[in-house]
Image (spheres, rainbow, N blue to C red):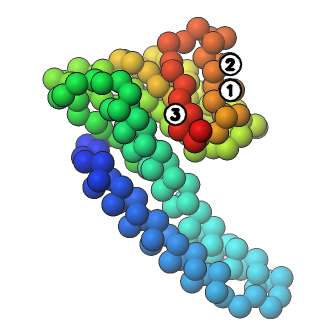
Amino acid sequence: MQTLGSFDEAHDKVLRDTQRCLAVINKLSATKCESVKDGISVLNQLRREAYEDVNQIQHEHLIISAAEWLELNLKLGSGVTWTWNPRQTGDNTEPDLRGTRNGVIVLSAEVTTSERPVGTIKTRMKTTLTKLAEMDGLRYYFVRTLSMAERAETKVSKADWQIAVVNLGA
């Protein structure tokens, strides 16, 4: 996991990443498309060059928003160090966001930018919540839509997990 650093620095990183990604999208979307073959070629290139960034940049931003929400709403006090996995690079033992104080984990959080809990997203939610339920400290699951919050609340309640679900999109 990486140290999150200041929220201003993290937001600046997300802005730079977003600008870089949008520049690629703008360049590719300006490509002339005069046949199906041309269009599919541009779409393939767009997927190769921008798809992952579109997902990951939103994930990074939601982690930062979660950390800000936690600091504002939990009053954890001074001395909390935030670490994160900005590009979903953590293993099964690491959350997206972790708060530690004096080397002790005080909070573990996962985030998802998915819009609707259907298909693979619903399955991934259960896996993520199961993983989070085993982590140390207070546990939070951050989403950005009402439908994702409702589904997560149902899963948490049925499993009797001590996980707070927070909708940051509301």
| Residue 61 drawn at (x, y percent) | 45, 50
Q: Amino acid at mark 2?
A: Thr
Q: Of callouts 3 and 1, which one flags the residue occurring earlier in the amino acid sequence?
A: 3
Residue, x 45% and y 71% (percent of image)?
Answer: 19
- Label 3 packing within 10 angstroms: few (<14), some (14-19), many (20+): many
| Residue 170 drawn at (x, y percent) | 59, 38
User: CA gap, disc 1 to disc 2?
Assistant: 6 Å
- Label 2 packing within 10 angstroms: few (<14), some (14-19), many (20+): few
Task: Determine which of the numbered discs, if any, sits on residue 154 in the image.
Answer: 2
Q: Of callouts 3 and 2, which one flags the residue occurring earlier in the amino acid sequence?
A: 3
- The residue to which callout 3 is attached is 142
- The residue to which callout 1 is attached is 150
- Taking the image as drawn, is residue 138 in sight? yes
Judge left or right: residue 32 versus residue 63: right
Residue, x 38% and y 67% (percent of image)?
Answer: 16
Q: Nearer the viewer, residue 111 or 164?
A: 164
- Label 1 packing within 10 angstroms: few (<14), some (14-19), many (20+): some
User: CA gap, disc 3 to disc 1?
Assistant: 12 Å
| Farthest-out residue, right | 36
Q: Nearer the viewer, residue 119 or 115?
A: 115
The reply to whether discs 1 and 2 touch (Cβ–Cβ < 8 Å) is yes
| Residue 137 drawn at (x, y percent) | 35, 18
Q: Considering only vertical position in the picture, is 120 above or below 161? A: below
Q: Nearer the viewer, residue 125 or 23?
A: 23
Mark 3, secondary structure of its residue: strand
Q: Amino acid at mark 1?
A: Glu
Mark 2, secondary structure of its residue: helix
Judge left or right: residue 70 versus residue 35: left
Residue, x 58% and y 80% (percent of image)?
Answer: 26
Judge left or right: residue 50 versus residue 146: left
Judge left or right: residue 12 versus residue 81: right
